[in-house]
Amino acid sequence: MPEGPSIVILKEAINSFRGKKILEADGYGKDLAYGRLHGTKIKDIKTFGKHLLICFPDFTIRVHLLMFGSYRINNDKKDRNPKLRLHFSDGQTLSFYAGSIVMIDEPLDDLYDWSADVMNPNFSAGKALKKLNAHPKTIVSDALLDQTIFAGSGNIIKNEVLFRVKVHPKSKVGKIPATFLRKMIRETVRYSFQFLEWKKAGTLRKHWEVYTKQVCPRDGHKIKKQYLGKGKRRSFFCPDCQLLY
């Protein structure tokens, strides 16, 4: 599942479609009113966490790629059926495959708390800390995947941030000292932007310190892998240098 930085890259890749007119829209999405798109212009393109938001004057298309979604720009293969394909007046196309695609009629400001998006300049560390403190019994690996607290944070970010701050993924939020919680919040934002930089350069995997690794680069101990939390997501951690609170 693409994390927030990857969705920012997607936004940048399709920014050239902003202001362009759609001649036709098609695909296999059951709940998409393709006719609403005909003759409309893309007003803006935004991101919120793992959501891509294609904005029109009266509605928004929300794209969530989930585990297997993908997109293509001017490169549609005849043997693939897109969930949504936009045909523009200049002959270009934008296609999305699989994932979740829905139309939103409500104003985005009513639906999204932009201060929760780790890639947004309006991200609020103070609000994140307050939300964390409201869930003291939650294990921290779940908290870092909570999109209402850290929109855009995914499993790679979770693992790497906890390794950086030396916190065990099974630690209860309410047991972690406030100093470390604040550090974790800062590192989540910092790592997300480093993720973006490394992803663009094609070097992200080279910078992983604990994710999918077998030996801790700090102390040489064996890295453990467990499936933790509500979603049973993969957690990689060093049982020696990451403290269990």
Image (cartoon, rainbow, N blue to C red):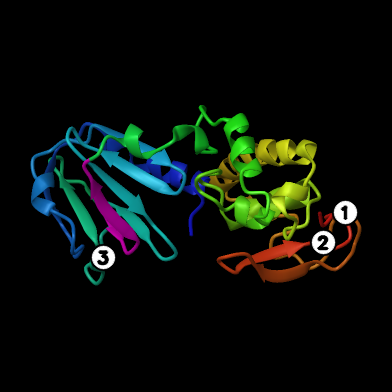
Q: Gap between marks 1 and 3, in whole Å?
A: 46 Å
Task: Name the residue nearer the viewer: 44 or 139.
Answer: 139
Q: Tell me where residue 236 appears, x and y as whole percent.
A: 72, 63
Amino acid at pointer 1? Arg
Amino acid at pointer 2? Cys
Judged from the image, the secondary structure of the residue bearing numbered disc 3 is loop
Amino acid at pointer 3? Lys
Disc number for residue 238: 2
Q: Tell me where residue 117 appears, x and y as whole percent.
A: 50, 38
Tag 2–tag 3 contact (CB < 8 Å): no
Disc number for residue 14: none
The residue where tag 3 is placed is: 77
The residue where tag 1 is placed is: 218
Q: Which residues are magenta?
A: 95-105
Left or right: 199 in relation to 176: left
Task: Name the residue nearer the viewer: 105 or 21.
Answer: 105
Tag 1–tag 3 contact (CB < 8 Å): no
Tag 1–tag 2 contact (CB < 8 Å): yes
Q: Residues within 10 Å of mark 1 (few under 14, many from 20)?
A: few
Q: Tell me where residue 146 appears, x and y as whole percent.
A: 55, 51
Judged from the image, the secondary structure of the residue bearing numbered disc 2 is loop
